């Protein structure tokens, strides 16, 4: 049996969801309108199943707690959450708190910094990233006056676009794209505006205006544009997307064999092609949608014709 953990997705119904996830995951996708596949989740209440490897039959939260990821039992929870977003409509205009704000406002251990890698995009697809107002108070005044959308910055996207979304950044993902999202493991979202939609119960969805504007920060575009250019490595090409205190994310395009050994544990999600993840105890066949957690201290290589993203914890980009 391989030493790596193969993790299955958890599917989240969303009002704005599309249909592309069924092309990725087939009959595993429920019949409801699904907007998100939580492909690597160790959140205690929404943890993905471990379908092969150590801890098979349990959840990633169980494996984390029992020390199968880090080599030692844990009392905290898995700190990274990876999703695939499939929007057929705009998500709400929203903002997330940082760690200190999450503890103060919600009694939660962490806030929600996140980042987006655009897997596919139709012509004209765009997202909202930041605002032009002087501060949160000015932006709130624009909301009251019906001018909020005039102050939000729309940005066109294409496949391969990448954005870091720091806590405090006002944002929204638009329709016509498929997005791989890496975030701190938190579900704290403050909706500022929801395009006057109603939920399945026929009522407007809840907004969180007071707390939301308490955490809105001025927009700093340099904090969102972090990705470097692709460069050749033995076995393929890598592109370093972001490295900060919460996660480090890298895109790989492999046509041979690349070494994925890391100092800490590493998350892998395949987004195109097929390959084999090989470690000293065996190998795992992977294809589009496969997600793997390589435990701390394990050596591993990816071989094949395959594109994937890796996510590592911590503040530095591993080799």
Image (cartoon, grey):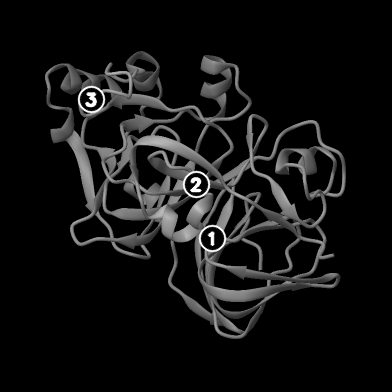
Toward which corner of the image does residue 128 lie, by quadrant? top left
Q: Is residue 101 left or right of residue 70?
A: left
The residue indicated by pointer 2 is 37
- What residue appears at the point 18 percent right and 28 percent down from the top-left corner? 148
Q: Looking at the image, do the residues carrying marks 3 and 1 touch, with CB atoms under 8 Å apart? A: no
The residue to which callout 1 is attached is: 289
Looking at the picture, how far across and down is residue 245, in whole percent? 60, 45
- Residue at 81 percent across and 65 percent down: it is 2
Measured in 3D between alpha carbons, the distance from the residue under mark 3 to the one under mark 1, in whole angstroms, is 39 Å
Q: Residues within 10 Å of mark 1 (few under 14, many from 20)?
A: many
Name the spot of residue 292 as percent of width and height, x first: 67, 59
Is 100 located above or below residue 177 in the figure? above
Q: Position of residue 42 (x, y in %)?
A: 66, 40
Judge by depth and name the residue closer to the eye, 58 or 293: 58
C-alpha separation, residue under disc 2 versus residue under disc 3: 32 Å
Task: Tell me if label 1 and label 2 are in contact, CB under 8 Å.
Answer: yes
Q: Image point 32% across, 20% down: which residue?
A: 205
Count every numbered label the image shows and give the total: 3
Tell me the number on the disc at residue 139: 3
Q: Earlier in the sequence, mark 3 or mark 1?
A: 3
Disc nearer the start of the sequence (1/2): 2
Instruction: State whether residue 133 is above or below residue 226.
Output: above
Q: Compute the Cα span from label 1 to label 2.
A: 10 Å
The mark found on residue 199 in the picture is none
Quick check: 78 left or right of 211? right
* Left or right, residue 17 beside residue 245: left
């Amino acid at each position: 049996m391989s030493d790596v953990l193969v993790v299955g997705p958890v599917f989240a119904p969303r009002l704005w969801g599309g249909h592309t996830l069924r092309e990725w995951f087939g009959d595993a996708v429920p019949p409801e309108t699904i907007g998100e596949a939580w492909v690597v989740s160790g959140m205690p209440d929404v943890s993905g199943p471990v379908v092969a490897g150590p801890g098979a039959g349990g959840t990633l939260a169980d494996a984390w707690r029992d020390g199968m990821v880090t080599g030692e039992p844990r009392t905290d929870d898995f700190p990274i959450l990876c999703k695939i977003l499939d929007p057929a409509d705009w998500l709400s205009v929203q903002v997330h708190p940082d760690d200190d704000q999450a503890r103060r406002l919600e009694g939660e251990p962490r806030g929600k910094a996140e980042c987006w890698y655009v897997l596919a995009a139709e012509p004209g697809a765009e997202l909202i990233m930041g605002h032009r107002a002087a501060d949160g108070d000015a932006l709130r005044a624009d909301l009251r006056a019906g001018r909020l959308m005039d102050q939000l910055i729309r940005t066109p996207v294409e496949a391969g676009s990448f954005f870091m979304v720091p806590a405090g950044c006002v944002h929204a993902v638009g329709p016509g794209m498929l997005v791989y999202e890496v975030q701190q493991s938190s579900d704290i979202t403050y909706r500022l505006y929801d395009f006057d939609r109603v939920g399945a119960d026929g009522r407007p969805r809840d907004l969180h205006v007071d707390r939301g504007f308490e955490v809105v920060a001025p927009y700093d575009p340099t904090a969102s544009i972090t990705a470097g250019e692709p460069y050749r490595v033995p076995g393929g090409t890598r592109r370093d997307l972001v490295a900060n205190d919460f996660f480090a994310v890298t895109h790989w395009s492999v046509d041979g064999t690349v070494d994925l050994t890391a100092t800490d544990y590493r998350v892998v999600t395949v987004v195109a092609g097929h390959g084999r993840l090989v470690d000293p105890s065996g190998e795992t066949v992977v294809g589009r949608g496969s997600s793997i957690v390589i435990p701390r201290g394990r050596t591993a290589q990816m071989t094949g014709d395959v594109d994937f993203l890796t996510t590592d914890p911590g503040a530095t980009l591993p080799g």
